[in-house]
Amino acid sequence: MKLLVVGGAGYIGSHTVQQLLRAGHEVVVLDSLTSGHRGALPEGVELAQVDLLDAEGLRAALAAHQPDAVIHFAALIEVSESMGAPGRYYRNNVVGSLNLLEAIVQTRVVPLVFSSTAAVYGTTDHVPIPEDAPLRPESVYGETKLMTERMIHAFHAAHGLPFVVLRYFNVCGAAPGGEIGEDHANKTHLIELAALTALGQRGKMMIFGDDYPTPDGTCIRDYIHVQDLADAHVLAVEALERGQLRAATYNVGLGHGFSVREVLDAVDAVITEDGLPPLPREVAPRRAGDPPRLVADARRIVEDLGFQPQFTDLKDIVRTAWEWHRAHPHGFGG
Ligand code: UDP
């Protein structure tokens, strides 16, 4: 198939480009490069540098490339930033996605795979969280993703747009081999911060709260390896192409969680093997808005698409992130 990967120069997008190419598909990337990196794309992959707010440019790119399907990753992704800059988030994520949907309908209706998030659920008692749990996002970011899901449903009903929505849990790790990985301007994710701390770029690791109602008092999250997540996109787009799916929403997670302490223990295990000392840690106050436990009910995508994550061992997951950061201490800019 020929895929247009929107936001393909970002963290999850670039890993998906790699897995699509390995599966034998043809890829064109559309990215504004506002937060993505040219260096995250394999040599020879065509890049259309277009912003989603440029409706005319989008239409022209779709008309020129005539993809068989579109995978849409492009978005602003920071929860706390979204609360302070709602306009930017609604414009980029909602208006940008609307422009993409309209451009698809105006050129040729082809299947769409959309990056959504567990943040659409908000705090919930239904853990592990099934796809039909109540949708009550607690951030502007989560709200923009839910609004986009709803627009996709409306375009499906009105124009027959086939779609798969994937709701990601905590995405982490890097392609084994260390050539691409996570490089956000603003570092907030636990495993990335721990790796940068091990590299001496930060002083110590803060544990945001150890008085949660969990076995060791720290928050539990469902950590899904970025390459497994990339494979979920390949499965989704191939199932759409076969006509096996027309309108589906899946959680993507392992279906079990790890605590902050378990993650930091795994980081220590990996870096001490490299002769480094364990990371200094300090318990800090809770971070606003962190629910104690977020774990996916991940059975639906396993049953429907045969999704089988390869990275289920926390230490293996952490090792891939560590190898990327160790080889690229300053990310793609280094
Ligand atoms: N966390 C932490 N110290 C850090 C960064 C994160 O204790 O320096 C905790 C955070 O409070 C949450 C978990 O690690 O419970 C995962 O946070 P992350 O930002 O990686 O992802 P989120 O779950 O917020 O999407």
Image (spheres, rainbow, N blue to C red):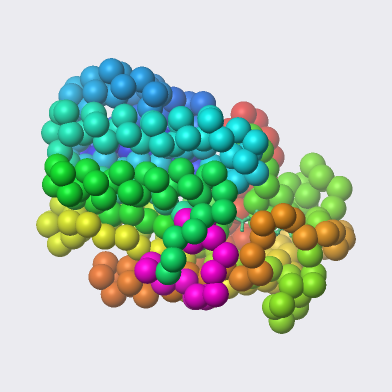
Residue 278 picture quarter: bottom right
Q: Residue at x 40, y 42 (%)?
A: 73
In this picture, residue 102 sits left or right of residue 281: left
Residue 77 located within the stretch drawn in magenta: no
Q: Position of residue 103 (x, y in %)?
A: 23, 29
Q: Residue at x 57, y 54 (%)?
A: 138
In the rendered image of this protein, does residue 179 appear above or below residue 102? Answer: below
Q: Position of residue 277 (x, y in %)?
A: 84, 60
Q: Nearer the viewer, residue 137 or 290?
A: 137
The total number of labels drawn is 0
- Specify whether residue 254 is in view: no
Residue 161 image position (x, y, % from top left): 18, 45
Q: Residue at x 33, y 54 (%)?
A: 165
Magenta part of the protein: which range?
Answer: 118-132
Q: In the picture provided, is 125 more to the left or to the right than 206?
A: left
Q: Is 127 in the magenta?
A: yes
> Which image quadrant is residue 105 in?
top left
